[in-house]
Image (cartoon, grey):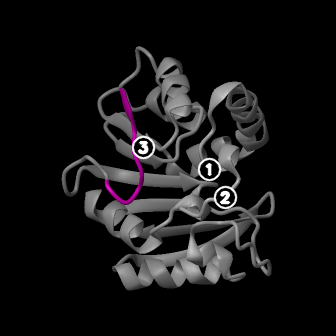
Amino acid sequence: MRSHVPSQAGGPHGAAGVVFGWLMAWINGPSYRHAAKMLDPQAEDWILETGFGTGHLAARLARVTTQGMVCGVDPSDLMVRTAQRRVAGLRADLRKGTADALPWPDSRFDKAAALHNFQFWPDPARGLQEVRRVLKPGGLFLILLRDHEGKTLQNLPNSISRSGREADGTIAALRDTGFQDVQRLANFDEAPVICARR
């Protein structure tokens, strides 16, 4: 990861990270609700979230997946602790980690989501391979991107996000990884929305 990536955005930490996490959860609240509706969780589902942040979406999903499990990785120790408190007592397994090294077996998950964190994946090809590996055949992958269209942001670690054609690049990368039925849906609150099937 490049050293000039905004440190709080890429991995909230310390007192400033607490404030950043609260602000991130407040700003992303509508996205969490939208994603939960699109994922349509069922009681028996196993759902993966990469970059779960404060755990608001994970908790929302885990209240439904009473016979399955919500799992996830996030690189921030602070966000892991915050999210683990939020999902206490629910069927959830939230760990420190990144999308490019997922600690679950092949074909474990019915659905997966990455909300507003794809731009921080330093190795998007490897991350997409890992998400595809842990999804069941036909499993749904939902990505909400930040609005980076037409911008070249050299401080982002993800080369696709830096390109200025993030949505098109993400779609191409998903197809190159072997995902099927890759679609760009209507933007949500200016955020490109992409879904694909394993």
Classify residue 158 as left or right of residue 31. left
Instruction: Write the residue at 52% across / 60% down.
Output: 142
Q: Give the range drawn in magenta.
A: 92-101
Q: Which of marks 3 and 2 is nearer the N terminus?
A: 2
Considering every residue shown, the one lying at the far top of the view is 89
Q: Residue furthest left?
A: 105
Give the residue displayed 64% in from the left and 71% down from the top: 185
State how far apart marks 3 and 2 are (Cα): 20 Å
| Circle 3 Cα neighbour tier, 10 Å, few/some/many (<14 / 14–19 / ≥20) | many
Q: In terms of depth relative to the viewer, which is nearer, 163 or 55? A: 163
Is disc 3 placed on a helix, strand or loop? Answer: strand
Q: Nearer the viewer, residue 4 or 157?
A: 4
Tell me if residue 188 comes above or below residue 178 in the rendering: above
On the picture, is 107 further left or further right than 86? Answer: left
Amino acid, disc 2: Val
Residue 45 placement (x, y as % from top left): 34, 41
Q: Mark 1 or mark 2, which is nearer the start of the sequence?
A: 2
Badge 1 crowding class, 10 Å Cα cut-off, few under 14, some 14 to 19, many 20 or more, is some
The residue at which mark 3 appears reads as 73
Asked if residue 168 shows in the view, the reply is yes
Q: In this figure, which residue is indicated by the disc labeled 1? A: 10
**Mark 3: which amino acid?**
Val
Check residue 159 for magenta coloring. Answer: no
Q: Residue at 76% x, 66% y: name it.
A: 147
Of pointers 3 and 1, the one earlier in the residue sequence: 1
Callout 1: SS? helix
List x then y, in percent, for residue 172. 51, 85
Q: Is 95 covered by the magenta stretch?
A: yes
Circle 2 is placed at which residue position?
A: 5
The numbered mark at residue 159 is: none
